[in-house]
Image (spheres, rainbow, N blue to C red):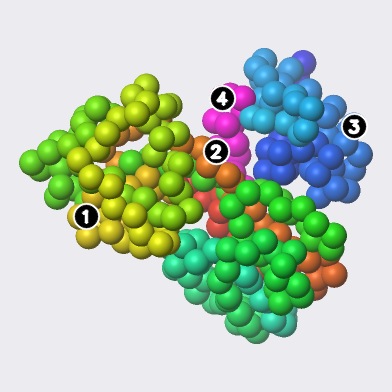
Amino acid sequence: MGDELPLNAIRAFEAAARRGSFVEAAKDLHVTHWAIGKQIRHLEDWLGVPLFERRTRGVALTDHGADLLTDVSAALTRLTSATSRLRGPQSARRVSGIVRVNVLSSFALRWLLPRLSRFQDAYPSVEVKISTSSRKLRYVGTGFDIGIRAGVERGPGIQCETLMPDRQLPVCNPKILRDRPVETAQDLRRHVLLHSTTTRSAWPKWFAAAGVPGLAPAKHLELDHVYLQLQAAVDGLGIALGSLHLIEADIAAGRLVCPIAGPELRADEYQLIIRDDRLRDPAIKAFRSWILAAAREPVQR
């Protein structure tokens, strides 16, 4: 087999990894799912390692596949930025319209809004309207063009694709570790654990993965929303299980740290959901391309 990098296979791999399905990747790339499977097998043979576990419903990345996706996503992000600079701002400035985005509150506050100015700078004639809700989008009706949810949503008239994984680790303000350091999962018994009403099962799952099922902390503190839970961690009220994508700015600023390197809890992946009747709208297409590229940027931890 030749040494030349199989770029078509890389493209097929990224689409299949992002969508979790050869069939859905084929729709994105306008080819048959057999062609996607052939390209993936070609890439696996070229690398000499398996990249996917084939399952009854879709596919899942192997450890080798997850490592490759990190590098491929970063490379595609750089390529997107480079080509956007070369094309210049004029093509983006010609795109106009309204994009109505319905998103989870915590995701809006801690991920989307801090990045949204980058989209608005690139597409100044596109108006973005943000609404927040945790309701299933099939109950929202026609009040959105694009939705962002945790977990796959299916229904008539909508297209769902993976935006980014949700990887979670214990996080806290570094100040609370001075008197009660945390080096192992057992050390959490001396701390207050923070919960939100929608993530009550997260800590038990993490304890089981860490090999300390049933560990009893010093105290529990429950808050209504994920963003309140994370703010409580920033304020030193205890230790939360934080989604790494949602706490990047806090990690970078030193407001939060991850005292334990693992295991990472894998929660439902964030999904990008678009109404079928809006897929061809230039403003919708621009926002989709932008947010998928932003989601590929490496996460800080």
Label 1: which residue? 237
Q: Which mark is residue 34?
A: 3
Magenta-colored span: 62-81
Residue sitting nearer the eye, 199 or 69:
199
Query: Can you tell which mark lies on residue 70?
Result: 2
Q: Residues within 10 Å of mark 2 (few under 14, many from 20)?
A: some
Which three-letter amino acid code belongs to the residue tagged 2?
A: Thr
126 part of magenta stretch: no
- Disc nearer the start of the sequence (2/1): 2
- Rendered residue at 43%/27% (across/down): 209
Residue highlighted by disc 4? 63
Give the dominant element type of the magenta stretch: helix, strand or loop: helix
Dots 4, 1 in contact, CB < 8 A: no
Residue type, mark 3 in image: Trp
Q: Residue at x 40, y 62 (%)?
A: 224
Look at the image and tell me in which quarter the N terminus lies: top right
